[in-house]
Image (cartoon, rainbow, N blue to C red):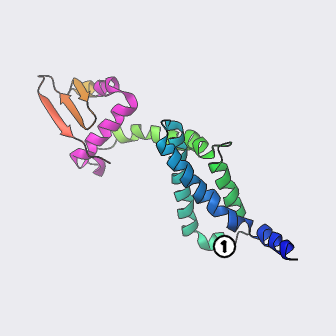
Amino acid sequence: MGSGALLSFVARNFDVLAAPFVTLVYPLYASVRAIESASPVDDQQWLTYWVLYSLLTLFELTFSQVIGWIPFWSYAKLIFNCWLVLPYFNGAAFIYDNYVRPVVLNQQGVLWSAPSGSSSFSKPDNLLLAAEKFIEENGTKAFEEIISKAGGVSKSKKSKKRVTFYNEGNARKESKLQES
């Protein structure tokens, strides 16, 4: 009777017993391995997983009263987390590639067409960070084209921590970038 009761308990509480291992223990282990590896692919998988895990946790905290009425929520969450975590499925990378990345890449158009009174550009550092992000995503030639259309700067040179702008008279102006 002892082993039958144990198996019955495990079967009834499988979601509660497995969830910490699926959602925390294995992802923590895999994240440390990803940090130590040279490949950026696994970094993307695990960074995306942690973002999605955080969003799911915030969703649960916000709608806990409603979720309490859904009888299969814990099992659905466990299955979803397995899909995100297991290397066979790479669900987190799938969500990043198909949903997050297109939204982030399309944000650059919105960023550059913001009105001049926008609070995003109220500080010079915000504009410099936006310019650096644009250069990283599109290259210096695309940035130079935008600047030349505006009639200002003709050349730019980017280092790791500074962006150096050269205007028409070759006067040099360096701007220190904030580290994030």
Quadrant in the picture for residue 60: bottom right
Q: Compared with residue 9, is residue 120 higher up or lower down, i.e. above or below? A: above
Compare residues 157 and 118 and report the one nearer the observer.
157
- Compared with 24, 16 (above or below) is below
> Residue furthest toward the right?
1
Q: Decide whether residue 123 is among the magenta residues.
A: yes
> Nearest the camera: 151 or 45?
45
Q: Residue visible at 33% across and 43% down?
A: 114
In the image, taking residue 40 as reference, residue 173 lies left or right, namely left
Residue depicted at 55% across the width and 63% down the height: 57
Amino acid found under the numbered disc labelled 1: Gly
170 with respect to 122 (left or right)? left
| Residue 73 visible, this orientation | no
On screen, residue 179 versus residue 28, left or right, reads left
Count neighbours of disc 1 (C-alpha within 10 A) and say few if under 14, some if 14 to 19, many if 20 or more: few
Residue 144, percent from left and from top: 28, 25
Is 164 colored magenta in this rendering?
no
Q: Is residue 113 above or below residue 11?
A: above
Q: Residue at x 64, y 55 (%)?
A: 81
Say which of 51 and 123 sits in front.
Answer: 51
The quadrant in which the N terminus is found is bottom right
**Above or below, comparing residue 39 to residue 3 in the picture:** above
User: Residue 56, how many percent across, how many down?
Assistant: 57, 59
Residue at 24%, 42% (x, y): give it.
Answer: 177
The segment highlighted magenta reads 117-146
Q: Please provide percent x and percent y for residue 2.
A: 84, 76
Secondary structure, mark 1, is: loop
Q: Mark 1 — residue?
A: 68
Q: Position of residue 158 (x, y in %)?
A: 26, 30
Q: Residue furthest front?
A: 2
Nearest to the observer: residue 132 or residue 13: 13
Q: Considering the whole magenta stretch, tell me its main secondary structure.
A: helix
